[in-house]
Every structure is written in C-alpha cells, then in structure tokens.
Amino acid sequence: MKISRIAILVMAVLLLAGCRKGRKTIQLDANFPSDAVPTDVRIVERTNTLRLQAPSVSSKVNLTLAMGEKEAAVSGTLRMKRNDVVQLSLVAFGLLEVGRMELTPDYFLILDRMNHRYVKKTYDEIDFFRTSGIDFYTFQSLFWNELFLFGDRGEVPAESDFKAAQQDDRILLLNDDSDRMLLTFVVNVHDALVGHTRVSDLRNPQGKVMDWSYSAFRDFEGTAFPGKMEMSFHFTRTPITLSLTLNNLKQSDGWDTRTRLSDKYQEIPLDAILNKIMSLSE
C-alpha cells in the first residue's frame, strides 16, 4: 500500500471503530469472566489520582497497521491538549506530512495531504456515534489512558459508577449505563493503572467494538504514562490491529490546535474511506 493510503486508513480506522447512581449490586453475569469473583476493593479513586495533569502532550510515534496477513508501518507525531484537541499526523520519510487526524469537541477531521482530500463531520452526523455516546471525550480518555463514561464530557468517574470483580491481580470495572454500549476496564491491583479498555455492543453477545491495551509505562510529569498502545477493531470481517509506540514524550503547547484548509482541498464522503477499509480487510 502507498504510504498516503496507509496514513488515511490508520486515521479512519481509529474513528470508524467508535463509528451517577448508587454502587451497583455485584452480579457476575456473562459480562464477567467465569473465574472473576466479587470484590470490595475500591480502586477507582486510586486510578483517578494517576491521571496525567499536564495540560498538553506531544510525542513522536511509530504505527503498525495489520489487517489479516497485510501489514504496514508509518511514523508521525501525536499531539494532545486536554479538553481541546487530539492530533495525529503521519509522515513519509520522516519529513513530509501525508495525513492527519484531528479530533475536537465539535468535529473530527481526516485529512489526505497527498491527494488534497478531507472528511470533516460532527459526531452527531454519524449514527453510531450519536446512538452509542462515543464522542471526542471518549477518544481523549482512550488516548490519555483514563477511566471514563459515555457522555461524561471529561468528568472523572466515581467508584459508584461501576460494577467490580477481581480476577487474580486485576480488578474488572464494568459500566452498562448506556442503552447500547458496555465499558470494561482492567486495572492492575498493585499500581492502579488501566491496562486494558474494551467497548462492546450490548445488542450483540459477540459485539466487541474495540479493545485498547496499554504497556511500556514510563514516568512522565510525575505519573506513569503508557509508551505503547495497541488497538483492535472488530467492525470488519477481519479484525484490524493498530500498534502505536510513543517516543520522546514531552509537554508541548507551541503548535496549532486547529487545521486550516485551503481551497485546493476537496471534501469526500466518509463512506468512501469506510468502503476502502472493508475491501482491504477481507
């Protein structure tokens, strides 16, 4: 695959995957593994204290995209500003930007620099996002390695928002407040770090939408932040896996948080990119 196509597919995959009560009584139903047991361990507050407090983050990244036997790699830069933007720029030969994904609270943008094309939509314009509650704050929490709830607009969740069970040295936290989606977090008992997040479709017993795993934690601005994120997306016949390795992580705010498009760029339908992903994954 040409590198420009790889860049656009990487960013489209990220987006199209997603395309306060009293504490719940523990019921170890089918949403929990069979070897999980009820627990009174209170870990949510500990996990919340580990949230990165830096207002902005910048990192060089290496990405690997795998679809069945097909695999491709590309480098780039990840830039994030709390409650404002997530930008992922992909480059060729370490110099030329070929694609960009930009997420803001108001819209998402997929930009093809090489062919001067783009997709720009609000979250409400995508049926799946609108009905599931997936929005900018969902993706922000996934990229920042945090606990979250659908529709929380970045608010910190409480212990009472989850059902909890323990499996060996891991605490499983479930939230099924959404009519459609189930959130599952796997948190390490010893260090309270989120190691895995899963989004599932409650309408389908096998309805995994995406898995987001974290590893290679390192100290950054006084807390542990993952140096590697692995995402698996299940909306195609062949699961799509994206591995994101972060290098040279730093706090940085000297960059443009909004992309400006000149008149030479042409808007294209979102379905055009989705259909391309579907054909490549079969």
Image: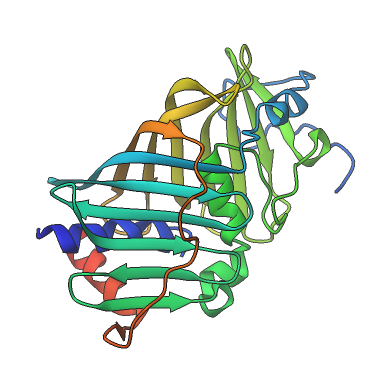
The colour scheme used to paint the residues is rainbow
Position of 147 with respect to 205 (left or right) is: right
What residue do we see at 28% from left, 72% from top?
A: 273
Position of 128 with respect to 247 (left or right) is: right
Query: How many discs appear?
Result: 0
Q: Between 38 and 132, which is closer to the camera in this rendering?
A: 132
In the picture as drawn, the residue positioned furthest to the left comes out as 1
Q: Is residue 21 above or below residue 172?
A: below
Position of 57 with respect to 182 (left or right) is: left
In the picture as drawn, the residue positioned furthest to the front comes out as 254
Q: Is residue 213 above or below residue 165?
A: below
The image quadrant where one finds the C terminus is bottom left
The image quadrant where one finds the N terminus is bottom left
Q: Position of residue 173 (x, y in %)?
A: 66, 33
Position of 73 with respect to 34 (left or right) is: left
What residue do we see at 37% from left, 31% from top?
A: 248
Q: Is residue 24 visible?
A: no
Q: Position of residue 85 (x, y in %)?
A: 54, 57
Q: Is residue 172 above or below residue 237?
A: above
Q: Position of residue 200 (x, y in %)?
A: 53, 50
Residue 30: name its quadrant: top right
Q: Between 30 and 239, which is closer to the camera in this rendering?
A: 239
Q: Is residue 52 visible?
A: yes
What residue do we see at 53% from left, 44% from top?
A: 142
Q: Is residue 215 above or below residue 93?
A: above
Residue 25: name its quadrant: top right
Q: Position of residue 44 (x, y in %)?
A: 73, 29
